[in-house]
Structure formats: C-alpha cells, structure tokens
Image (cartoon, grey):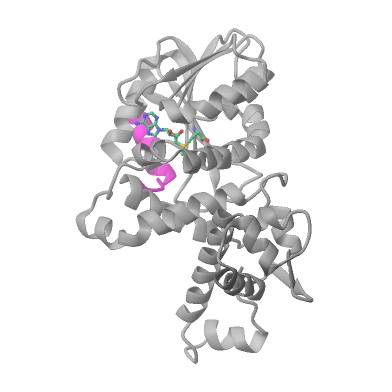
Amino acid sequence: MPVPLSPDEAKAFLDSDAAPAVYLDLLDAVSFRTAGAALRLGVFEALADGPLPVDQLATRTGTDPLGLRILLDALTGYGYLTRTDGRYANSANTTRWLLRAAPGSFAPVLSVWTALLTHWWQDLESSVRTGGPTGDFYAWLEQHPDTLADFQTMLRGQADWLAEEIVELLPVPDDARSLVDVGGGHAGYPVALLTAHPHLRATVVDLAGALAQGARTVADAGLTDRVELRAGDLFTADLGTGHDLVLLFNIVHGYQREQTLTLLRRAAAALRPGGRIALLEPLADVPERPAGTGEAFVRMFSLNLFHTQGGRAYGYDELAELLGEAGFTDVRQQLLTRSDTDHLVTAVLAG
Ligand SMILES: C[S@@+](CC[C@H](N)C(=O)[O-])C[C@H]1O[C@@H](n2cnc3c(N)ncnc32)[C@H](O)[C@@H]1O
C-alpha cells in the first residue's frame, strides 16, 4: 500500500529536491511484492475466518514460522494486516479486495502483475535496447495455467463492469445475425451482447487454454447452442465471413502497425459490407477527467505491452488511420463512463 506521508514529509519528497522521491517508489515496490508473496503463500485466505497467531498461520500455510513472522510484520507495517495481542488479521481493505471470494476481487490482478513484474520485467532494459519483446507472452501464459486463469478472471471482471455500457453503445440492427469475437477468451462480451440481442450468434476465437474460461461463461449463461468457441491463432484461424459485427477488444495494443493492419484487414474480410468493427482499447490519449490513476496506468501498461508483446497503447488518430487503410469508414470513439482509460472505437466496413 502507498506509504502514508504527513503533508510536511510529502512536500520534502514530492514538491522539492530535499529528499529522493525514488525512496518512496522503493518502499511501494517492496510493499507490492510483499503483498504478492502473501497472496501466493495463501496468507490472506488463511486469515479469512479470523485472526491467528504466527505458529498456527505457519502450519496452515506450510511456511517457516520465523520467515512468516517477518513477512507478517512487513505486511502489518504496509497496512495489509493488523496485529493485536500477537494475532494477525486481514485489514479491512485486504478483506474487501484481496480475498478470492470478495465481489470484484483484486486478487487476480495482484497475481497477474506479480507474475509480470517478477518474471517479465526483470529484463525490462532488454526490449528497450533491442526494440522487440523478450518472449511470447501468450504462449507463456498458456504454459502457466494458474496465471492464465487469473489473467482471464481479471479481464472477465473488467467485462462484467464495462459490458452493460458497451451493449448500449454498440448499434446492432434487428437483422444482424452473427458476430465474431477475435481474442475473446473469457467470452464475457459476446455473452452480454447475445443476452441483449436474442437473434445473434457468436464465434469466439482464441488460444485453447484461454477458451477454457470462455466455455464456463457460455455454459453458465445457457448459451452453448448460440456460441462457437474456436481454438486457433488470431492471424491464421478461420474467422468466417458475412458477420455483422467483429469485436477486437484489448487486442491490437499487443502489436505494432503492420500486424495491427493485418488484423484489421482480417476483421474486414470477416464482415459483410456495412458490417461494424468494435475495438476496446486504453488509448494513449488519456482524457483529462479529474486527475487520477488513468495517466499512470496507461503509461505503465504501454511499457508492459512493448516489453512483453512488442505492442503499445495506440493514439486515436493512428488507430483511425489504420482503420481507414483497412477499408473502414465512419470511425468513432467513445470514452466509457465506467473507466478513466477505456475507449470503444467503432467503424463501418465500406461497401
Ligand atoms: C488482453 S486479452 C483480451 C481478451 C478479451 N478480448 C477482453 O477484452 O477481455 C487478449 C486475448 O487475445 C488472446 N490471444 C493473444 N494472442 C493470440 C493469438 N496469437 N491467437 C489467438 N488468441 C490470442 C489471448 O489468449 C487473450 O484472450
């Protein structure tokens, strides 16, 4: 958790050169890493039913009592835990956000970013030096089922939060029959669209492991007869033809211009003339809504995309130009009201 500072301390670090601001980053980075360790060791879940002394917690989590106590004291200092009479408990914020069963739990996000920062960002300099990613992020994810499940759960949570507005904003004509969700994984968005439009069918194309969660979403919604889950590669899989709608949600930011253009052309080939493409993206032009974490998120997300996939956050103008090159017209963008950063970009296939 962020280091709490009195106004005087904050002034020294942030508004002057009296103290090195990077020291605060050091403490916050270590705090984040410590929380990730506690999550991986099962500390928060072990405390879900109430406070425990260190020995019992060590038995429950299969950890070394001394090492665990030192970790617990750090977590207490950072605000993740409290300690009373030698018993440790989850803080109110931990109970609300870091237990797996909490509504909209942040545990999958902590898990995914812990994996990114510990596994991928250790050689951040390399991609910046060479100009390319240091590995194949999605192939790696497919090999790490626990992180993959957390990754898809994290995105499914975002879909649960954003889908209602997206369904409202996306025009779907009464005679529309089918959509294809390219890289649709957890299938949260097509399920929301099919629920709102009973005449629609969907094809979801993604890697096999990613579709495991999609299969559950579709089954839970009772839509197995209207959704086809198609395992394959975005660049080679059969996307079908004559669709009314193509979704490319959180996909093109994984790629640079040429590959993005290829994907947009593949989307165009899958649509009927007059069909619509919809992209969901945190765009590089961060809107000036009340100052918040949006700007910081987009900058670090773009760096992560470049490092892990060779991609980046696109600006709207560049995306609109690429859509035009791929044969689309009537390009529009809409910043979603439930997000500081996510834009719905739509365009119509000329024809
Ligand atoms: C950032 S996620 C977006 C998921 C979903 N569209 C959303 O917005 O929540 C990117 C998705 O693309 C899929 N993906 C990445 N590379 C792929 C590839 N080469 N072929 C098929 N799917 C791929 C991933 O498995 C993942 O589900």
Q: Quadrant of residue 61?
A: bottom right
Name the residue located 44 percent from the left edge and 58 percent from the top edge.
Answer: 300
Where, quadrant-wise, is the N terminus in this rendering? bottom right
Q: Residue at x 57, y 11 (%)?
A: 176
- x%, y% of residue 331? 46, 31
Q: Is residue 277 left or right of residue 227?
A: left
Question: Which quadrant of the view contains residue 240?
Answer: top left
Q: Which residues are magenta?
A: 311-326
- On the image, the x and y values in percent for residue 312 come to 37, 48
Inspect this view and state whether residue 288 appears: no
- Seen from the viewer's position, the closer of residues 293 and 207 is 207
Q: How many numbered marks have been drawn onto this rendered protein structure?
A: 0
Look at the image and say whether residue 324 sits in the magenta stretch.
Answer: yes
Q: Is residue 45 magenta?
A: no
Image-based side of 209 in relation to 233, left or right: right
Q: x%, y% of residue 245?
A: 50, 19
Dividing the image into four equal quarters, which quarter contains ligand 1?
top left
Q: Is residue 260 above or below residue 301?
A: above
Q: Nearer the viewer, residue 156 or 110?
A: 110
